[in-house]
Amino acid sequence: MRMKLFSCATVLLFSLQVQAEPATRTTIEKFLQVTEAANMMDQAYQNMDQMTAQMLASSGLDISKDPQIQQDMQEMNALVRAELSWDKMEEPLIALYGSVFSEAELQDIIEFYQSPAGQKMLKRQPELMQGTMVMMQQQMQSLMPKIKALTEKQSAARKAAQQKTDQ
């Protein structure tokens, strides 16, 4: 009886170990290629440029009329692109995906992205990202006055508390 229990436990442990095999670098690189991760990053930068311009415009700054603001924005975007370039992000992404997904899981995800539904998801992803950015920007516009009011309230409370301790 003990031998059967030991055998079952060994088989169960071995099957769990096989299922949890870490994703290989080759599989992770294939995933990043199939999902067009580098292109997605480029599109994210373009969305960031548009969002920055929209935020400046909504704050009353007309970047088309102010060459200094245009230059500042270009420098900022160049810095972000340089520091978060694909060349700098690829290795950390490979490590991250390797720590999160097993080989089997990543193979299943790759299979999905190679399917018609997965391909549609990839093609529509930029549209979803743009829509999400617009939605977040709208939410932030309505949130900013609330944040400002809360900050002012907290500041007033700190000043009142400070005045009490000074007396």
Image (tube, grey):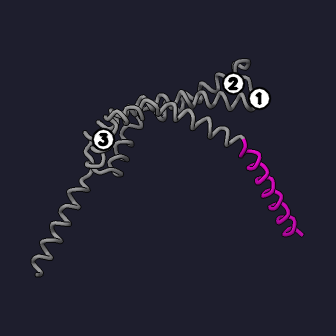
Residue 112's x, y, as percent? 33, 40
Chief SS of the magenta region:
helix
Q: Mark 3: which secondary structure?
A: helix
Question: What whole-number distance in Å separates the C-alpha atoms at marks 1 and 2?
Answer: 12 Å
From the viewer's perspective, is 148 left or right of 45? right
Q: Residue at x 15, y 71 (%)?
A: 8
Which is nearer the N-term, disc 3 or disc 1? 3
Q: Which mark is residue 60?
A: 1
- Looking at numbered disc 3 in the image, what kind of residue is underneath it? Ile
Q: Mark 1: which secondary structure?
A: loop
Q: Nearer the viewer, residue 13 or 24?
A: 13
From the viewer's perspective, is 56 left or right of 20? right
- In the rendered image, residue 155 lying in the magenta stretch gets the answer yes
Which is nearer the N-term, disc 3 or disc 2? 3
Question: What whole-number distance in Å separates the C-alpha atoms at marks 3 and 1?
Answer: 45 Å
Q: Nearer the viewer, residue 24 or 118?
A: 118
- Looking at numbered disc 2 in the image, what kind of residue is underneath it? Ile
**Neighbourhood count class around disc 3 (C-alpha, 10 Å): few under 14, some 14–19, many 20 upward:** many
The answer to which quarter of the image holds residue 63 is top right
Q: Nearer the viewer, residue 88 or 151?
A: 151
Q: Residue at x 52, y 35 (%)?
A: 129
**Pointers 1 and 2 in contact (C-beta within 8 Å):** no
Task: Tell me: residue 54, above or below residue 109.
Answer: above
Residue lying at the far front in this picture: please name it. Answer: 116
Question: What whole-number distance in Å separates the C-alpha atoms at marks 3 and 2?
Answer: 40 Å
**Extent of the magenta region:** 142-167
